[in-house]
Amino acid sequence: MKKLEKITTQEENFAKWYTDVIQNGDLMAYGSSKGSIIFKPLSFGIWDNIRLILDKEFKRIGVKNVNLPLLIPESLLNKEKNHIDGFNPELATVTEVGGKKLTEKFFIRPTSEVLFGDFFKNEIESYNDLPLIYNQWVNVLRWEKTTNPFLRTREFLWQEGHTIHSTQEEAETLTKKMLDIYTSFVEEYLAIPVVKGQKTEHEKFAGATYTYTIEAMMKDKKALQTGTSHYLGQNFTKAFNITFKNKENKLENPYGTSWGVSTRLLGALIMTHGDDRGIIIPPKIAPTKVDIIELFAAKDSRVSEVASQISMLLDNEFISNEIDKSNKNAGFKAANSEIHGTPLRIEIGPRDLDNDVVTFVRRDTLEKHQVPISNVLQMTKKLLDDIQNNLFNQAKLRLINSIKIAYNYDEFKQIINSGYWAITKFCGDSILEDEIKKDTGATSRCMPFNLDIKIQSDNCFYSNKKTDKIVIFAKSY
Amino acid sequence: MKKLEKITTQEENFAKWYTDVIQNGDLMAYGSSKGSIIFKPLSFGIWDNIRLILDKEFKRIGVKNVNLPLLIPESLLNKEKNHIDGFNPELATVTEVGGKKLTEKFFIRPTSEVLFGDFFKNEIESYNDLPLIYNQWVNVLRWEKTTNPFLRTREFLWQEGHTIHSTQEEAETLTKKMLDIYTSFVEEYLAIPVVKGQKTEHEKFAGATYTYTIEAMMKDKKALQTGTSHYLGQNFTKAFNITFKNKENKLENPYGTSWGVSTRLLGALIMTHGDDRGIIIPPKIAPTKVDIIELFAAKDSRVSEVASQISMLLDNEFISNEIDKSNKNAGFKAANSEIHGTPLRIEIGPRDLDNDVVTFVRRDTLEKHQVPISNVLQMTKKLLDDIQNNLFNQAKLRLINSIKIAYNYDEFKQIINSGYWAITKFCGDSILEDEIKKDTGATSRCMPFNLDIKIQSDNCFYSNKKTDKIVIFAKSY
């Protein structure tokens, strides 16, 4: 396999650092076609954990998993105009089979609102059949011009939830609840603090009434959208003529939502926590929580014995761990553990064993601890907790310290050019938002829900129109 | 949702019975494009269980999950000639994006040998890097002319394992081991007995050196291939120029395998166990093992109380169960439980409660048991075991009684025309196999490993050439 190479530092070139660490950390390889990537065992292991944990959360609130087809007939996609306009340029299109031209074209799904619309139509008759709360874990394709591994790839993996309800209130409550589930999950498991909020008209999902989002800040302070939850109103149910008999026995169109998170969460995780030695995986989501490294095992049989004992001890408590059995030297093994982001490593050597201790090394702070063998389990649990909390707190501090108030366009440009997020009063005019984007490279991220920042102005920083809308702008991935 | 309709009986029309039960049992809906289906929560729940259980078995022997792209560039597929010849007519082809023609065509993967080949090439240098034992759970597409839900759909879900090894022996051992894992899983969890064997040259996988298969018998006695494991030799590693330095420090091509099971297992399960009331799901794979039905709950508050108690009791032992809370009558609820194939239902009514009993109804035999409330947990476990075993034994009996020896072509045709499987000595000539297929509609299923049937002949039943090959022929899905 690939040798460990020198990693570009974050300060030198953050973008280069990112592609260095994901390749050296065996997270991905480039696929056979442009803009595609291969998820290697480590990155797919993290995604598998994300799926397992989120799926349990979904099921707790009654979500059911289904699986809909990959291909959308051309005639179907044309039914919701805003939606097709939003996705049309990115649609990979199947026009032939075995060299023969098809009579109808098929699009590879970029998302599945229209497929669910067509499905839901035949599934309901009365309010008794509602709500339908469905989800699928699938691949989707959007033919992006510029790509970046995990963050923006032509094909990506995601879950997409699609629901219909008999009342607007119930649908809006679910839209909000999914945002909360995403927030808790991303903050608790991925240790990534997020700003919750609503997208402006300019940035909302094509076909939605409104879009909620969670926005995270990477180490270079750029913003990354890490999850969205859309309230669709009756937009799709009217377009697809989905009706049900309500309690007054009248035909009505149900109210819809859709929501998703994708493998871009892996990019978020890497860019939030990684350092110049490689990636750092938060313990709660790590496929391997502890690497066990033997020093001078050939010279002292106690080393392998204690390594096996500790491994079994951790196995019994369901703390995933691996003993590095390769024939490399200890320095290589330590660097290898670091580059793969394993949160904790335990080094076992003859000198330590003479004193009945082993050495713990935290991946986040690189601190070393001499730990009595009798105390290994307790200390492992404590340090894994500490690492999880420390990663979150570091990221939270960075986020809070990097959001600056802009009262006018000069201040705004200075904040954006310094790489920070600008929070400001903004009228929400889509044409002006476009102007700002072209001029500064910043896009509106959201109208935040959970930020306690007061802005002493009643007017839009750009148009000077009176407004009470608070909007965050930032450069983003 | 759809009303319960009369189901065509198996005797009337088995094919119609099949599509009746899968629709009435809420297993699937037809998708928006021809030959595609939607997995509804029940069928996807079974597939999710298959994935969970098999994935654990895979990991036990060191399989690692990865994820490779959906699209294959045209240039890549042309590298292994037998392989492309086998799949070419079925390839869905992406030729344009957003209305603009692409400079290179892309095929939607029908299977991923060539993508793994291209990936493996860059992953290995020496024997130290081998074996690579990878698997992915993904969707694939084959543009089939005639389709049948679950059994043969244009898109299907599957796992595909792809491995490379430094020795032929190691690769062949793994090919065999995967067949054994599939056999154990399908027999133990899906309660489907199978014949293990090797495919003839005519039926082997395009690009393989040889193919192992497990073949199951449906209730109409047709054969269904339910899993395959291919030894690829160096066919793909040579075509893709994959090399490693062996222990003698010489460059060598590694030895490959690939293996898979698909959502066709759902079709196998339905056609092996279902009856005229609907599907029957073996307890070990059932998303809901027990349906709890309340009788006259509005008139007697004890009914709902006992239902909740029993539900909690089963929850605590991880026996999945559901109380039917709908406002339908008890007869409807019982039929509904039957049509959805829940292996066991517990009916709770006032008259039974006066005697401190509840009524158990087995889905397989429809037998009723009055069970003392104090004995509910024990009886649930016992009956679920009994149902699992009974389903397997019934199917095994049918399989054994339906394989008949053919010593000549007349006997062969009589056996095939009566719907049975013919076991016979066959020379293995592909041209003759084609003739037999055209004449009788039967295909060779496998050269069986695990059948104790003696054939008193040294000559091919068709060509009369001397041969020691034993081959099973049957009509199949």
Image: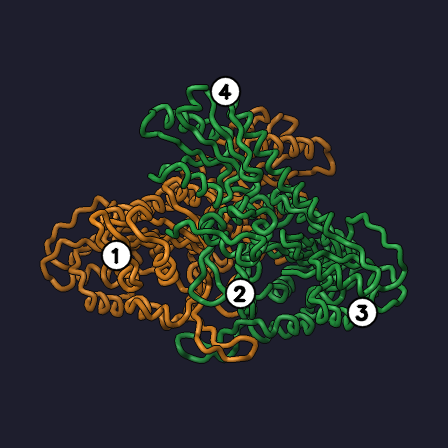
Chain colours: A orange, B green
Residue on which disc 1 sits: A253
Secondary structure beneath label 3 = loop
What residue is rendered at 49% in x and 47% in y?
Answer: B45
* Nearer to the camera, B359 or A216: B359
Secondary structure beneath label 4 = helix
Please check whether the numbered discs 1 and 3 fall on a single chain.
no
**Residue A84 visible from this viewpoint:** yes
The chain under label 2 reads B
Badge number at residue B429: 3
Please report whichever mark, 2 or 3, sits nearer to the chain's N-terminal start. 2
Q: Which amino acid does label 4 sit on?
A: Ser
Q: Distance between the residues labelled 1 and 3?
A: 62 Å
Q: How far apart are marks 2 and 3 (CA)?
A: 31 Å
The chain under label 4 reads B
Residue on which disc 2 sits: B154
Please check whether the numbered discs 2 and 3 fall on a single chain.
yes
Please report whichever mark, 4 or 2, sits nearer to the chain's N-terminal start. 2
What residue is rendered at 33% in x and 56% in y?
Answer: A223
Badge number at residue B374: 4
Q: What residue type is labelled 1?
A: Asn
Q: Distance between the residues labelled 2 and 1?
A: 32 Å
Q: Distance between the residues labelled 1 and 4?
A: 49 Å
Please check whether the numbered discs 4 and 3 fall on a single chain.
yes
The chain under label 3 reads B
Q: How far apart are marks 4 and 3 (CA)?
A: 64 Å
What residue is rendered at 13% in x and 53% in y?
Answer: A468
| Disc 2 + disc 3, Cβ < 8 Å | no
